[in-house]
Image: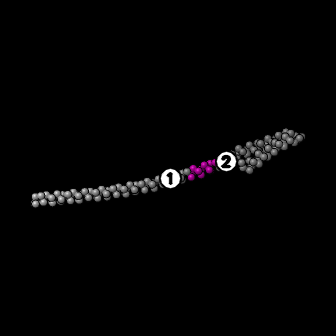
Amino acid sequence: MNVPTLLASSTAAAAIGLAHLADSPWPELGNLSATAILGWYAWHTAARTIPELVRAFRDESAAQRALLVAERNTGRDDLETLRGEHLAERRALREELTAERTQRHADQQAIVAALEQLAACLASKITNP
């Protein structure tokens, strides 16, 4: 509760209390004063306090919304970074698998050539003892 509202409520309470306790020759004057204070308090609440609360709420909401948008954009940037890293890892894995496949093919060709050479050597030994 802010200070003007607190002062207004305590002033209104004091005025009402004094109107009831005092033996005023004009009791209607006390009622009129209490009514005026309560009317001012209602006007102040409706014209000043509530709009200030609404404005503060909107400012805080806008700040939180901006923070959430910034966090979401940061998350998108992080996601793009992770996506780039993932693509680079996939590319590196493909290149590694291609290199291994090429080496296996070369090794198989060497084995086939060695077996053909061995078969030719054995065939020549069988025909030429």
| Residue that extends furthest to the left in the rendered view of this protein | 128
Label 2, on which residue?
53
Identify the secondary structure beneath mark 2: helix
Q: Is residue 33 visible?
A: no
Q: Is residue 40 left or right of residue 59?
A: right
Q: Is residue 89 left or right of residue 37?
A: left
Nearer to us in this view, 28 or 20: 20
- Dot 2 amino acid type: Leu
Judged by depth in the image, the label closer to the viewer, 1 or 2, is 1
Q: Position of residue 62 (x, y in %)?
A: 59, 50
Q: Position of residue 34 (x, y in %)?
A: 80, 42
- Residue at the spot 43% in from the left edge and 56% down from the top edge: 85
Q: Is residue 67 left or right of residue 93?
A: right
Disc with the residue nearer the chain's start (1 vs 2) = 2
- Residue at the spot 74% in from the left edge and 50% down from the top edge: 3
| Residue that extends furthest to the front in the rendered view of this protein | 129
Decide whether the magenta segment is chiefly helix, strand or loop: helix
Q: What span is colored magenta in the figure?
A: 57-67
- Residue at the spot 40% in from the left edge and 57% down from the top edge: 88
Q: Residues within 10 Å of mark 1 (few under 14, many from 20)?
A: few
In the image, residue 92 above or below residue 40:
below
Label 1, on which residue?
75
